[in-house]
Image (cartoon, rainbow, N blue to C red):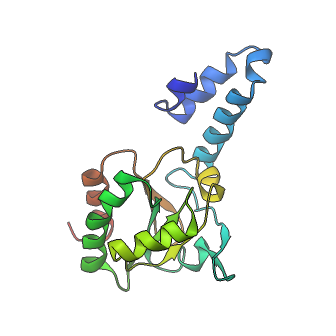
Amino acid sequence: LYEMSMWMRTGQIDTAVAKLSKDIASLEMVKKIVETNDALKKTAEGQKFSDFTIEQPDGTKVSLSDHAGKGKYILVDFWASWCGPCRGLTPEIKELYRKYRGDNFEIVGVAVWDKPEDTERAIAEDKIEWPQIINAQEIPTKIYGITGIPRLILIAPDGTIVARNSTGWKDFKEIVLNKLGKK
């Protein structure tokens, strides 16, 4: 079930878990699958984004709601400095940011599972220009049911989640451009 849960949809997981004996259902691994599945349902496309607040290295606090639900499409990029695929996606995200940032579009990076000093070094090395929420650790990944990165979520101007990247970058970028009226 654990391995299959990585590829199953939330309804399929619900069905599989319902068929388990009470002994198996009470295992910590199964509880974690259920917790992640519940988070995915709460933050699925069509749901309002779930907020979180993170203390930054300088002591200030930053929330996702400082950006999302404020009248712009917000592309949220969950990443870490040690994640090769995350860093490899940065030039693609940078191109999108430079072309379309403005009144209707913004990107927010959320550094998870990383040391703040490593995140800051990666931001400088990659010349990342968009706002960042640093030192988020596992707080947002638990809220959003994220088990691997990079992970992208597009939030509409009204705060509704309109896309999660279960497909590749090319397909996700097309969704973003369609929502921005650029395709």
Residue 78 drawn at (x, y percent): 48, 59
Observer-nearest residue: 67 or 55? 55
The residue sitting at 32% across, 55% down in the picture is 172
Question: How many labels were placed on the picture?
Answer: 0
16, above or below 100, in the image: above
Is 117 placed left or right of 95 in the picture? Answer: right
Q: Which residue appears at 41% of the width and 69% of the height?
A: 122
Residue at 50% x, 24% y is 4
- Quadrant in the picture for residue 124: bottom left
In the picture, which quadrant includes the N terminus? top right
Using the image as rendered, state which of residue 6 and residue 161 is in the foreground. Answer: 6
x, y percentage for residue 180?
A: 31, 71
Residue occupying image coordinates x 26% and y 58%: 174
Asked if 30 appears above or below 20 in the picture, the reply is: below
- Residue 180 placement, left or right of 63: left
Outermost residue on the bottom side: it is: 103
Could you tell me residue 62's position as x and y percent?
63, 77
Quarter the C terminus occupies: bottom left
For residue 106, say whether it is visible.
no
Horizontal and vertical percent position of residue 160: 52, 63
Residue that sits furthest to the left in the current view: 183
Splitting the image into 4 quarters, where does residue 173 fall?
A: bottom left
Residue 24 visible to an observer of this rendering:
yes
